[in-house]
Image (cartoon, rainbow, N blue to C red):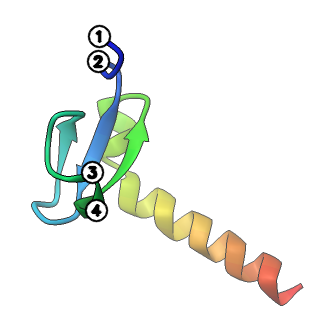
Amino acid sequence: MAHENEWYFCLKHHRVEPWDGCRAADRLGPYPDKETAEHALEIAQQRNEAADEYDES
């Protein structure tokens, strides 16, 4: 199965789910494991801050 190791964070339900969860527009990912997907919001915030710093330089 091609998607068996993909995990997502659903923005609608605020939970981690496998590939066959909610629609793509409502989630972040894929992540390599469930534990990483649990930190999706933190990862997104860190990436946004890094991009903002890059834009300001």
Separation (CA) of disc 4 from disc 2? 20 Å
* Numbered disc in front, either 1 or 2: 1
Q: Which residue is mark 3?
A: 9
Separation (CA) of disc 1 from disc 4? 22 Å
Q: Secondary structure at mark 4?
A: helix
Q: Residues within 10 Å of mark 4 (few under 14, many from 20)?
A: few
Q: Which residue is mark 4?
A: 25
Q: Name above or below for residue 16 compared with residue 43.
A: above
Q: Residue furthest left?
A: 13
* Numbered disc in front, either 3 or 2: 2
Q: Residue at x 10, y 60 (%)?
A: 13
Q: Which of the 4 image quarters holds residue 17?
A: top left
Quadrant holding the N terminus? top left
Separation (CA) of disc 3 from disc 2? 15 Å
Label located before the other in sequence (4 or 2): 2
Q: Name above or below for residue 53 compared with residue 21.
A: below
* Front one among 24 and 28: 24
Q: Which residue is mark 2?
A: 4
Q: Position of residue 9 (x, y in %)?
A: 27, 51
Quadrant holding the C terminus? bottom right
What amino acid is labelled 4 in the image? Ala
Q: Is 19 situated left or right of 5 in this image?
A: left
Q: Residue at x 43, y 61 (%)?
A: 42
Q: Residue at x 38, y 62 (%)?
A: 41
Label located before the other in sequence (3 or 1): 1
* Numbered disc in front, either 3 or 4: 4
Report if the CB atoms under discs 3 and 1 are less than 8 Å apart.
no
